Image: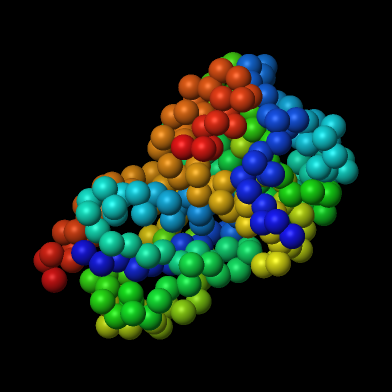
Amino acid sequence: MEPLSLDDILDKNVMAVGLPGSTKADAIDALSRKLLDAGYITEIPGFEKDIFYRETLGKTGIGNYVAIPHGQSSYVKRNGIAIGKFKNEIPWESIDEKGVYVVCLFSVQDGDNGGNEHLRMLAALATKLGKDKVINALLAAGTVDEMVQAFDL
Amino acid sequence: MNIVGISACAAGIAHTYIAKEKLVEAAEADGHTIHIETQGTVGTEDELDPADIAKADVAIIAADISVSGKDRFKGIKTIEIPTELVIRSPHKLMKKIEEIVESK
């Protein structure tokens, strides 16, 4: 089997720019809807419950206007990441006390382990989010294609 | 300076890897050599080479949970911090580590 690349996990069907919304719930709803429509999750309420549980454990705002809500959920069929850029700054619990414009919502299957290649790719993607230049390019992206390109940096 | 370390977060999905990258970028910007092992949901990756540990000046444990294999850092100045602090101010942290190591 070919090893997966970042392109296999970056799915434009679950990415969007210019999203409306003004609260964390709006943002998670919008991205969960995309994950449902693209077949990553089986339902929204159960999935969101697991995501919001993770939110209670610690801040998922990683600074510089980016948040990475995530969590393992039995409502996830496929591991993936929905990325949305919002028109408004959304209040979020962030390590720099700022709100966010970019939300990367990770869908991760319950009970995953080391054998899971997709989970490894999510980790690789998270690594990219540790790079300032990737974050800056994501914040500057005006289209979904530009968001995808941001991860090439 | 030679740095080794471990990163691990509560869910083991995202912060572990972001913290690693922040540490690597900050250390390399200051001209240090760094190796960070990640202990996440996918298991341990980039496991530390005993040779790197042997020549390390300092060990960083960036973790929100207990990590395994801390005993490998016996005899090395070890700094333990939450991943959040690493992600928030990696460069400041690196300066602090430089001070600690130099004042030894």
Q: Position of residue B21 (x, y in %)?
A: 43, 51
Q: Position of residue A50 (x, y in %)?
A: 74, 48
Q: Name the residue at 29% across, 54% down.
A: B27
Q: Name the residue at 68% across, 44% down.
A: A9
Q: Nearer the viewer, residue A43 or A116?
A: A116
In the figure, is residue A42 to the left or right of B93?
A: right
Q: Nearer the viewer, residue B6 or A71?
A: B6
Q: How is the image coloured?
A: rainbow
- In this view, B98 is above or below A126: below
Residue lying furthest left = B103
- In this view, A23 is above or below B79: above
* Residue A3 occupies quadrant: bottom right
Q: Name the residue at 18% across, 66% down.
A: B101
* Tally of marks: 0
Q: Position of residue B68 (x, y in %)?
A: 50, 76
**Could you tell me if residue A97 is visible in this image?**
no
**Could you tell me if residue A5 is visible in this image?**
yes
Residue lying furthest front = A2
In the figure, is residue A63 to the left or right of A108?
A: left
Q: Position of residue B83 (x, y in %)?
A: 44, 55
Q: Name the residue at 70% across, 30% down.
A: A12
Q: Nearer the viewer, residue B80 or B36?
A: B36
